[in-house]
């Protein structure tokens, strides 16, 4: 995609990958609008990046998504890039009873939210000369983590939705890109500085570099290694990765 001169809206940009992408697009000469629930952080990010704008947004709430989409269309008619990034990753245990509040919030944030936001903006994006939708999924869309089963399922569902949407939009001005990050050192679980987590800056740099190409599936090197490991079947890869996590789990706090 063209990395400058766009009007970009990023959900969940008060922290982590969303904030990193927002600041990277801002530096590249794009109009950037960020969304998220925490007003103080929205103000902090826009304060540090003059000209960047923010809107309060709760991706679990349809009225909030509708109001953000309406505001974007009214105030930013040139909007041509939507980055569905907001997400949460609570732990769960699919071998026992699931906490229904947790299930509902994960599905609402990670799956219903991006589908709803995209749906409300799709006609607007189709009317632009060149638009891009970026869905931030995860390596766990392909290789589920048993300690985060509901999260993994929402990401697999978004991977599927991305492929359908890409095909359905193939003859339009809208390109659909999937970014599937590896474990990145953010607040998503706990900013642990664990050596298995990719540093945020390196992840943003690599992702931006790949967005400049015509690749529709953005996988950094460590994701490519996981997904293309020649020795194992999918089942064996899932088993091996989860056994490794049992021996050396993701720190929870
Ligand atoms: N870090 C990783 O290892 C990793 C790996 C693969 C994929 N990802 C994906 O990358 C995306 C960003 O995660 P991150 O690692 O940057 O985590 P993060 O640092 O915790 O940031 C998550 C962002 O999502 C926003 N958010 C959460 N719930 C929201 C809601 N209901 N409405 C609106 N915004 C909401 C948060 O903003 P507010 O709290 O201010 O609303 C925050 O800005 C997620 O989709 C995640 O699944 C991350």
Image: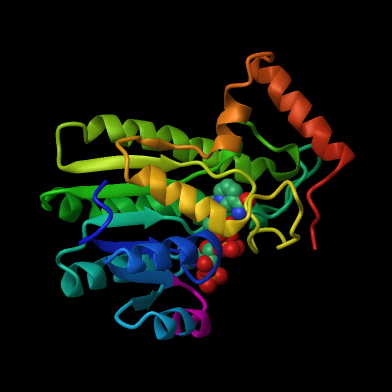
Q: Is residue 157 above or below residue 183?
A: above
**Residue 23 horizontal/vertical position (percent):** 42, 68
Q: Is residue 74 above or below residue 51?
A: above
The residue under the point 22% across, 36% down is 169
Nearest the viewer among 62 and 219 is 219
Nearest the viewer among 121 and 227 is 227
Image quarter where ligand 1 lies: bottom right
The magenta region covers: 36-43
Inspect the magenta stretch and tell me whether residue 227 lies in it. no
Q: Quadrant of residue 252?
A: bottom right
**Residue 50 horizontal/vertical position (percent):** 34, 83
Q: Quadrant of the C terminus?
A: bottom right
**Residue 15 falls left or right of residue 28:** right
**Residue 34 horizontal/vertical position (percent):** 38, 70
Inspect the magenta stretch and tell me whether residue 40 lies in it. yes
Q: Quadrant of residue 229?
A: top right
Q: Is residue 106 above or below residue 232?
A: below
Identity of the residue furthest to the right in this view: 247
The residue under the point 37% across, 55% down is 83
**Residue 145 falls left or right of residue 223:** right
Q: Quadrant of residue 45?
A: bottom left
The residue under the point 70% across, 23% down is 237
Magenta region's main secondary structure?
helix
**Residue 110 falls left or right of residue 11:** right
| Residue 165 shows in this picture | yes
**Residue 60 horizontal/vertical position (percent):** 48, 62
The residue under the point 75% across, 50% down is 195
Q: Is residue 138 above or below residue 112?
A: above
Nearest the viewer among 250 and 96 is 250
Q: How is the image coloured?
A: rainbow
**Residue 118 falls left or right of residue 142:** left
């Amino acid at each position: 995609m063209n990395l400058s001169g766009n009007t970009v809206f990023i959900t969940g940009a008060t922290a982590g990958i969303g904030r990193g992408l927002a600041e990277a697009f801002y530096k590249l000469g794009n109009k950037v609008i960020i969304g998220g629930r925490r007003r103080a952080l929205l103000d902090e990010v826009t304060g540090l990046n003059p000209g960047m704008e923010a809107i309060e947004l709760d991706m679990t709430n349809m009225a909030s998504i509708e109001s953000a989409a309406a505001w974007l269309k009214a105030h930013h008619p040139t909007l041509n890039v939507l980055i569905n990034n907001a997400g949460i990753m609570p732990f769960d245990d699919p071998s026992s009873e699931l906490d229904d509040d947790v299930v509902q919030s994960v599905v609402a944030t990670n799956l219903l939210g991006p589908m709803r936001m995209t749906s409300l903006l799709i006609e607007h994006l189709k009317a632009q000369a060149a638009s891009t939708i970026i869905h931030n999924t995860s390596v766990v869309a392909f290789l589920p983590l048993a300690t985060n089963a509901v999260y993994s399922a929402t990401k697999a569902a978004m991977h599927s939705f991305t492929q359908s949407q890409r095909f359905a939009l193939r003859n339009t001005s809208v390109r659909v890109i999937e970014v599937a990050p590896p474990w990145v050192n953010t607040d998503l679980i706990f900013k642990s500085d664990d050596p298995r987590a990719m540093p945020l800056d390196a992840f943003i740099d690599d992702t931006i570099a790949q967005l400049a190409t015509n690749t529709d599936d953005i996988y950094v090197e460590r994701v490519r290694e996981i997904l293309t490991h020649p020795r194992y079947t999918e089942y064996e890869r899932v088993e091996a990765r989860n056994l490794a996590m049992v021996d050396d789990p993701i720190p929870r706090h």
